């Protein structure tokens, strides 16, 4: 008797038992911790020079985004990649508008308050 093969449906979520889905979430959680804790330690205890620290933070952030997309948002490059890409780009647009608008407003308020 062979072990059941884990397949995935068109949304990228594991097809089958809740244990397979839980295993996927636990993998994502473990990878997220693995990407977060060393960088946190490097910042907290000053393990790296400043320039190397910024590169480590950036690399960990990009990897973290990939882990979040794959394991928690179930966005993959196979299957319905066009719809997933549109979702990601629209989300990035909204976040850029919110972040840029906030910075714009704060800069404008700083100028009106007579900041340096």
Image: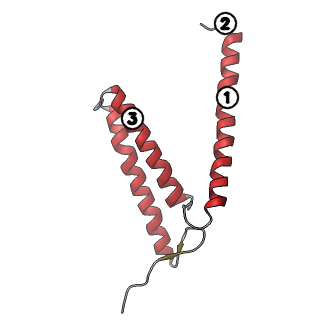
**Residue 22, x across and y down, in percent:** 47, 68
109 relative position to 22: left or right: right
Residue identified by numbered label 2: 114
**Residue 9, x across and y down, in percent:** 57, 74
State which tag comes first along the sequence, 3 or 2: 3
State the residue lying farthest toward the bottom: 1
Q: Residue at x 51, y 53 (%)?
A: 68
Q: CA distance from mark 1 to mark 2?
A: 19 Å
Nearer to us of marks 3 and 1 is 3
Determine the image quadrant of residue 26.
bottom left
Residue identified by numbered label 3: 55
Q: CA distance from mark 3 to mark 1?
A: 26 Å
Of 60 and 83, nearer the camera is 83
Where's the N terminus, which quadrant? bottom left
**Residue 95, x across and y down, in percent:** 65, 40
27 relative position to 71: left or right: left
Mark 3 crowdedness (10 Å alpha carbons): few <14, some 14-19, many ≥20: few
State which tag comes first along the sequence, 3 or 1: 3
Determine the image quadrant of residue 36.
top left
Circles 3 and 1: CB distance less than 8 Å? no
Circles 1 and 2: CB distance less than 8 Å? no
State the residue lying farthest toward the left: 47
Where's the C terminus, which quadrant? top right
- SS of the residue at dot 3? helix
Q: Residue at x 43, y 68 (%)?
A: 23
Q: Residue at x 50, y 77 (%)?
A: 7
Say the numbered circle drawn on residue 102: 1
Mark 2 crowdedness (10 Å alpha carbons): few <14, some 14-19, many ≥20: few
């Amino acid at each position: 008797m062979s072990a059941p093969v884990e397949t995935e449906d068109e949304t990228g979520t594991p097809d089958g038992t809740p244990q397979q889905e839980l295993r996927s979430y636990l993998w994502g959680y473990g990878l997220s911790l693995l990407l977060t804790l060393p960088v946190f330690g490097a910042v907290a205890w000053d393990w790296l020079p400043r320039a190397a620290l910024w590169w480590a933070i950036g690399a960990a952030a990009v990897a973290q985004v990939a882990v979040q997309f794959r394991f928690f948002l179930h966005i993959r490059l196979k299957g319905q990649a066009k719809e997933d890409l549109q979702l990601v780009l629209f989300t990035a647009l909204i976040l850029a508008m919110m972040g840029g608008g906030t910075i714009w407003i704060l800069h404008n308020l700083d100028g009106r308050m007579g900041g340096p």
